[in-house]
Amino acid sequence: MINGKLTRVVRNEETNLGNLIADGINVKAKELVSKLIPEAEQSTIKGYVAIQNGGGIRAGIDQGDITLGEVLTVMPFSNSLVALKVTGQEIIAALENGVSGLESDQGRFAQVSGMRYTYDSTKKPEIVNATTNVVEQVGERIVSVEIKQADGSYTAIDPKAYYILSTNSFMAGGGDFYRSLAAAKADGRYYELYLPDYEVFTDYLAQVGTVNNATEGRIKDLKGATPTPTTTPGNPSNGGGPVATPSPTATATPAPTAAPQVTTLTAETLTAQFAALPAGSNELVIPLTSTTGGAQAVLPASVLIQQAAANPASVLTFNTTDGTSYSLPLSLVNGTALAAQLGTSSFTITVSILPAGTATLSSVNQAIAAQAGSVTLAAPVIEFSISAQAGNSSVPLNSFGSTYVSRTIKATQSLNPDNATAVSFDPATGKLSFVPSVFTTQADGTAIVTIKRNSNSYYTVVQSSKTFGDITSHWAKSAIDLLASKLIITGTSDTAFSPSQAVTRAEFAALITRSLGLATVSSGTTFSDVNSGAWYADAVHTAAAAGLITGYTDGSFMPNSPITRQEMAAILSKAMKYTGKSLNSDPAALAKFSDAASLPAWSQAAVAEIAAEGIIQGLPDGSFAPQKSATRAEAATMLEKTLLALGFIN
């Protein structure tokens, strides 16, 4: 119950819980975004507001101490916090969308903070074709929108002014038909704040203490009546909510999970097994028994370090009884560094292969639901991890530089690699990402999926099918469909890919980091024109950290400039070498281009290498056209060929 009514009231009117959640979003976003916006730009921001879709509030909260379990029941989707720089007109458009699903009890209704709005449910709603995303009827329901000021008063929204609107990642991506928010994100007016919504809410509850808030007239339905001005006081310091006295907040106790089956190998046993390997064999297979809680192996680090010194190519492969496996190259166990961190050279290595807990599985399902196209779970969600342990000290060993580690998951059904992929799940952001993976069909019809990545995380397999209406007869349709279904590329809208549009340097940085399955790097090399709040900032930092991209001599990266064919070839060459692939700079491959002599020295080797691999082709006139801008279709085709050449897809 909320306000004494059934929970779904959040889908059609203001509620106290909706206000509380929206206030928490607004307060946290203002705290974080105000630090990201350059000082010179601060004066152009006319207010901070927040929107929470009613469909994202799944339950009420009973009187008494608020537990984490109750919060997770209210907000089970683990969407991340996002802020957008939007115009007043874009806010009005968002609210018009929010009040256009009332008749069918849709979840798009906007609970708000930092503003109030009046609408008339007797007027025409906005109607959008769910297939084409085209507006078939312009909405006329929003009557007025007012922005809350620092003194608690309200002023009419300025359609041309800029505001910071915070919301969840689902809505920012266009979920629930919030097209104006998706457009702002696509325009780069986007700050990913990397906080799950439930954590934002619990932090705010801790600030508020005792919750006594009520509805405040933030949302009013005229229902055909003539509008009259109203004044609603509020406390500007907490986004419009009341002043409260802090009190202790209860913490939920997670439900117990089954313990993993632990297999411990002694130094004598492991040494004997290595000694028994056939001559020329680098791989030792260790079988592990799994329970519903998964499997773990505990190994003496000293033996692993000695074996790696004797044979740097040594690999330990752990096969579980439920069809999962993990292969650990022993060269990744840096004994000196780990001993320094643990304060002793006597430590163990624990390899864990564990099923995801209930909360994580729920978050994965919500991440799948937020994906464009048809995406379904096709395998268990497994957490792979490694740690070094000595006494009560533990050091994680989950990032492997440019070394790609293999692990396998058994799918529960037969899968077609064209519309299935392995993905990693990041609990911090609530996002799924493509990871390199190949599929092998077993005799029983199920699929074994081999995942290759240079870091550990949660992994699973999804079936996914995605296409676009503007590539029906396009020459690159198969490559575009494949990479879109594998969650590598996205369209310029939900229904359009724009294959002939040029690719920017920032966009290709994002594409190459996704294609390689690289874990996000948020710091490191900086460029003068890459704002930390830009949508592409992490992709550029990640690509630079891997040595895939460089900037210009003036310290800039020029993220919005179209990428040229020779620049793309250079990045693809670096990317393939990063994974350990050897390339041949074949002069004959370069000579086939009529304009080979015009290639600058810095790009000649890369173009020759990529051409020799058959990844990049010449134009119909026989030229390479190094300075020509690459199109989205060309980028998709070259990425597909690169992934196939690396054995990262099949």
Image: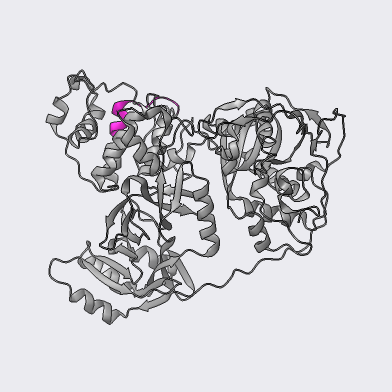
Q: Which residues are magenta?
A: 560-570
Q: Is residue 569 magenta?
A: yes
Q: Is residue 89 magenta?
A: no
Q: Quadrant of residue 226?
A: top right
- Looking at the image, which residue is at 42% across and 62% down? 382
Quarter containing the N terminus = bottom right
Q: Which is more toward the observer, 258 or 103?
A: 103
Q: Which is more toward the observer, 275 or 197?
A: 197
Q: Quadrant of residue 381?
A: bottom left
Q: How many marks?
A: 0
Q: Which is more toward the observer, 192 or 467?
A: 467
Q: Is residue 469 left or right of residue 358?
A: left
Q: Position of residue 405 (x, y in %)?
A: 32, 57
- Looking at the image, which residue is at 39% across and 42% down? 485
Residue 553 in view of the camera: no
Q: Is residue 266 above or below residue 553?
A: below
Q: Which residue extends farthest top?
A: 621
Residue 307 in view of the camera: yes
Q: Position of residue 321 (x, y in %)?
A: 34, 72
Q: Is residue 12 left or right of residue 440?
A: right
- Looking at the image, which residue is at 73% across and 29% down? 141
Q: Is residue 129 left or right of residue 63?
A: left
Q: Position of residue 555 (x, y in %)?
A: 43, 30
Q: Position of residue 235 (x, y in %)?
A: 82, 43
Q: How is the image coloured?
A: one colour
Q: Quadrant of residue 333?
A: bottom left
Q: Is residue 204 above or below residue 549?
A: below
